[in-house]
């Protein structure tokens, strides 16, 4: 996430790929030409499989194909690619839960949640360390959601195999509202074509996918499609909680508990604390004395300044003099750079458990993200192998794992939304929950996520303005992992267990 007006909001394709959370693409190396409009495609690959999920074998049908979107004149505008999994022998299909899942970006395909989190097959990666190069191993995903819900993984237009076609243009899809409309039309057409109108329907988005879910929940409600539940995984609804800039100190204190968790993980807190109790204390300090000190700005008394610096040192392990020279405001990317500076290492933004040698030890921020560098190759190769060799889907197009072009053209400036730093879709989620009082929300959070910190999520979801009875419809899960919770096998199993309870 950016930490100042002079820095790009994108750190490059490797950093973006793992968590698929990009907020702008102003760098020159992101300026790619738009893909040529694709002809309409209708091919579909249907295969049958069995996977061991949990402690039992689940038979299922996999369908990989596209659904064509159209404009007001019924002219084709885009083909949206999806892979759907329908379990067999688990009750009437028409009444079985159905989950639409995706990553974010903007510009990210659904490959990560597909082969990392919820799909029936997954790629083996190394926990909290780099995964060696190919060959990679694809195995049954014991923590797939397929034993609980049928699944549809959807690639946003311009990502994966989803392409603009016919009368469509980039401006019709590459934006906060436009993207929501495209997914709304896709879901409506999918449930019509597959007889799923009477199925309980869920959304499961990661990263910018949570932004999409908030917008989509409201739009679907307006279309008469009431959701049963929304899973927000590594959430960003209010971008002001993540982008520090002059006049906005909110991210400094909402990031503090995540930074404290990361410091404890890397043994920078002595003695080693009881993590849940420690983080509760840090939360209280962040929204109490620390927030108060930041609010005083230039009027902060020197004695109070010294006391805050000392406490921040105790909570983060950063040197007192560095904290004071930073005016008590350390941006997230500087924290990633400074925590292990004594060993010339940097930590991951998407998953701060990962560490690696720093390419530029004297630089202001890290040049790469060790967490995305560690898994990008594995997921890219595994998905391309899986979609062709196991699902037998054939396309002459490249699978766009992450499209910089989509990200670069994303329309944050719309009448409805404003600029990236002002984007806040929490009102959309509040509207959907109010109009549909049966809608439940589950918020999944990685303790070591420095892209979408858990305290910022708590702040946002605690300020939706819901009626008290509806506020209790939001529940939380916390995991010893980063942005991609499923990269830690222990966290992945705990997430699956929590989601089974959430669905049932």
Image (tube, rainbow, N blue to C red):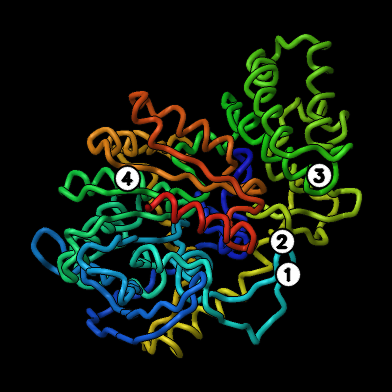
Q: SS class of the residue under badge 4?
A: helix
The answer to the question of whether label 3 and label 4 lie on touching residues, with beta carbons closer than 8 A, is no
Of badges 3 and 1, the one in the foreground is 1
Q: CA distance from mark 4 to mark 2?
A: 32 Å
Q: Which residue is mark 2?
A: 370
Q: In the rendered view, would you say 396 is above or below 375? A: below
Q: Earlier in the sequence, mark 3 or mark 1?
A: 1
Q: Earlier in the sequence, mark 4 or mark 1?
A: 1
Of badges 3 and 4, the one in the foreground is 4
Q: CA distance from mark 3 to mark 4?
A: 36 Å
Q: CA distance from mark 4 to mark 1?
A: 35 Å
Q: SS class of the residue under badge 1?
A: loop
Q: Residues within 10 Å of mark 2 (few under 14, many from 20)?
A: many
Q: SS class of the residue under badge 3?
A: helix
Q: Earlier in the sequence, mark 4 or mark 2?
A: 4
The answer to the question of whether label 1 and label 2 lie on touching residues, with beta carbons closer than 8 A, is yes
Q: Which residue is mark 4?
A: 215
Name the residue: 24% across, 81% down: 41
Q: CA distance from mark 3 to mark 1?
A: 21 Å
Q: Which residue is mark 1?
A: 130
Report x, y in % for residue 118.
46, 65
Name the residue: 57% across, 54% down: 10
The answer to the question of whether label 3 and label 1 lie on touching residues, with beta carbons closer than 8 A, is no
Q: Which residue is mark 3?
A: 338
Of badges 1 and 2, the one in the foreground is 1
Name the residue: 79% across, 43% down: 264
Is residue 9 in sight in this rendering? Answer: yes
Q: Residues within 10 Å of mark 3 (few under 14, many from 20)?
A: many
Q: Residues within 10 Å of mark 4 (few under 14, many from 20)?
A: many
Is residue 395 in sight in this rendering? Answer: no
């Amino acid at each position: 996430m950016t930490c100042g007006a002079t820095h790009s909001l994108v750190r490059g394709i490797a950093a973006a790929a793992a968590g698929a959370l990009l907020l702008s693409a102003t760098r020159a190396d992101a300026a790619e030409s738009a893909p040529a409009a694709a002809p309409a495609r209708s091919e579909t690959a249907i295969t049958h499989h069995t996977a061991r999920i949990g402690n039992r074998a689940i038979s299922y049908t996999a369908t990989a194909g596209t659904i064509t979107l159209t404009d007001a004149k019924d002219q084709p505008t885009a083909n949206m690619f999806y892979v759907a999994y329908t379990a067999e022998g688990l009750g009437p299909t028409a009444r079985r839960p159905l989950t639409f899942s995706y990553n974010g970006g903007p510009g990210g395909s659904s490959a990560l949640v597909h082969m990392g989190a919820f799909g029936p097959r997954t790629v083996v990666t190394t926990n909290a360390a780099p995964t060696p190069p190919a060959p990679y191993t694809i195995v049954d995903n014991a923590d797939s959601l397929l034993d609980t819900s049928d699944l549809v993984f959807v690639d946003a237009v311009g990502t994966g195999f989803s392409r603009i076609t016919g009368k469509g243009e980039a401006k019709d899809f590459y934006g906060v509202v436009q993207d929501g409309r495209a997914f709304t039309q896709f879901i409506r057409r999918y449930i019509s074509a597959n007889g799923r109108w009477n199925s309980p329907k869920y959304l499961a988005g990661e990263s910018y996918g949570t932004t999409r879910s908030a917008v989509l929940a409201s739009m679907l409600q307006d279309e008469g499609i009431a959701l049963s539940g929304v899973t927000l995984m590594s959430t960003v609804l209010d971008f002001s909680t993540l982008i520090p800039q002059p006049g906005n100190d909110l991210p400094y204190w909402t990031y503090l508990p995540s930074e404290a968790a990361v410091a404890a993980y890397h043994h920078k807190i002595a003695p080693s604390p009881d993590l849940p109790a420690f983080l509760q204390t840090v939360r209280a300090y962040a929204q109490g004395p620390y927030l108060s000190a930041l609010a005083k700005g230039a009027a902060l008394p020197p004695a109070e300044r010294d006391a805050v610096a000392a406490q921040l040192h105790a909570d983060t392990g950063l040197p007192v003099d560095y904290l004071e020279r930073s005016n008590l405001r350390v941006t997230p990317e500087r924290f990633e750079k400074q925590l292990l500076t004594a060993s010339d290492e940097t930590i991951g933004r998407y998953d701060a458990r990962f560490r690696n040698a720093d390419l530029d030890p004297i630089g202001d921020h890290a040049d790469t993200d060790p967490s995305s560098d560690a898994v990008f190759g594995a997921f890219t190769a595994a998905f391309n192998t899986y979609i062709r060799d196991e699902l037998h889907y054939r396309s002459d197009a490249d699978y766009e794992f992450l499209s910089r072009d989509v990200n670069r053209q994303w329309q944050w400036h719309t009448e409805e939304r404003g600029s990236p730093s002002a984007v806040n879709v929490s009102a959309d989620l509040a509207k959907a929950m109010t109009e549909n009082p049966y809608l439940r929300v589950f918020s999944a959070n990685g303790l070591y996520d420095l892209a979408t910190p858990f305290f910022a999520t708590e702040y946002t979801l605690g300020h939706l303005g819901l009626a008290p009875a509806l506020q209790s419809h939001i529940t939380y899960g916390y995991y010893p992992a980063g942005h991609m919770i499923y990269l830690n096998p222990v966290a992945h199993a705990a997430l699956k267990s929590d989601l089974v309870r959430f669905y049932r």
